[in-house]
Image (cartoon, rainbow, N blue to C red):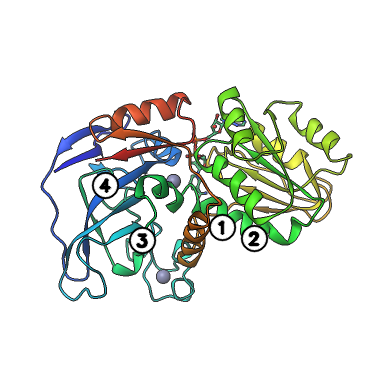
Amino acid sequence: MKALQYREIGVAPVVVDIPTPEPKPGEVLLKVTAAGVCHSDIAVMSWPAEGFPYELPLTLGHEGAGTVAALGDGVTGLDIGESVAVYGPWGCGRCIKCAAGEENYCQRARELDINPPGLGAPGAIAEYMIVDDARHLVPLGDLDPIQTVPLTDAGLTPYHAIKRALPKLTPGSSAVVIGTGGLGHVAVQLLRALTSARVIALDVSEDKLELARKVGAHEAFLSDAEAAGKVKDLTGGIGAQAVFDFVGVAPTVATAGACASVEADVTIVGIGGGTLPVGFGALPFEVSVKAPYWGSRDELIEVFELARGGAIDVHVERFSLDDAPEAYERLHAGTINGRAVIVP
Ligand code: NAD
Ligand code: ZN
Ligand code: ZN
């Protein structure tokens, strides 16, 4: 089968022919119908050889959907041909976090060397993929896999962040979304669907700001040194009750802190390496700063329910598996608007 693999540190990923995997006991083989391309992979491929956490070659893709192609021994409850999406942050399934569906915070994943597909385990940008356990599959039903696959990360991750900030987002409040790319343009829609907050979007690209307006941002303007001041002006000097940073570099994290109100939730989702000093006087009183990772299994089902109800429309750009390297080049160059999805 064809697969997109990262094979050598610092070298762009390539499409290769590898044996089609067979499911071992307990595993499920999917025929991939769609796989999303996330900016985190660009970060992974920028890491140096020293301390690189995954074995190479690595088949990329941690947003996956497919139809059930074969079941390993002992797997029940799935039909061959059924359309499913993959819950990516795999855990042990037994610890207290996994028992609550929060496999993204599994207490034993590291010790047991359990890795998400595309981030250690073979990923979804291939003709077939192995899923380690049937509990990591969510039925898609009538949802279109190509439109829906980005929700497994670009939907689930902002949903998890926003859900925790909901008590702050009362009528009359404001929410800031920094970086309206794959995750951010879904975040804008989630905020509109779940809250009555005024949504303010910031980005460095006019195309992305246009998309943010199209999907529901009340205000959208350039993310620069003046952005926090503009947010303050728009909020009568008070600031935003929730700020979501989907970039996470030093200047955006600084903006996030500077446009927060007293008691705001500041959530740093982007993995750009920026840090925000916390301490008395460093931020408005009682600001909470969080840096979450992905989301829980039940939250993924909730995101799909929102999609089913028409609340989320992911802006998708399709690529064939042969063109997957181009999708990564374009994402790296900042010219994907919405989410790139590979359709094998
Ligand atoms: P993306 O490339 O699709 O979107 C990033 C957006 O940020 C683009 O629209 C870009 O124009 C914009 N941007 C760049 N610099 C900016 C700046 N200074 N100010 C404002 N906007 C700026 O990326 P994505 O796939 O949506 O991922 C977003 C970030 O979230 C990445 O850092 C990714 O690694 C991270 N991520 C984290 C988690 C998690 O669990 N914490 C999960 C998924 C992705
Ligand atoms: Zn991701
Ligand atoms: Zn666990």
Mark 4 C-beta closer than 8 Å to ligand 2: no
Percent from the top left, x then y, of residue 70?
A: 16, 62
The mark tally for this picture is: 4
Identify the residue under disc 1.
160
Q: Position of 317 compared to 162: left or right?
A: left
Percent from the top left, x then y, of residue 179?
A: 59, 35
Residues at marks 2 and 1 touching, judged by CB atoms closer than 8 Å: yes
Q: What residue type is labelled 4?
A: Glu
The mark lying in front, picked from 3 and 2, is: 3
The residue carrying pointer 3 sits among few (fewer than 14), some (14 to 19) or many (20 or more) residues within 10 Å by Cα, namely few
Identify the residue under disc 3.
141
- Quarter-wise, where is residue 200 in the image? top right
Q: Is residue 65 above or below residue 205?
A: below
Q: Which amino acid does label 1 sit on?
A: His
Percent from the top left, x then y, of residue 28?
A: 22, 63
Q: Can residue 152 be seen in this view?
A: yes
Identify the residue under disc 4.
55
Mark 1 C-beta closer than 8 Å to ligand 1: yes
Assign a secondary structure to mark 3: loop
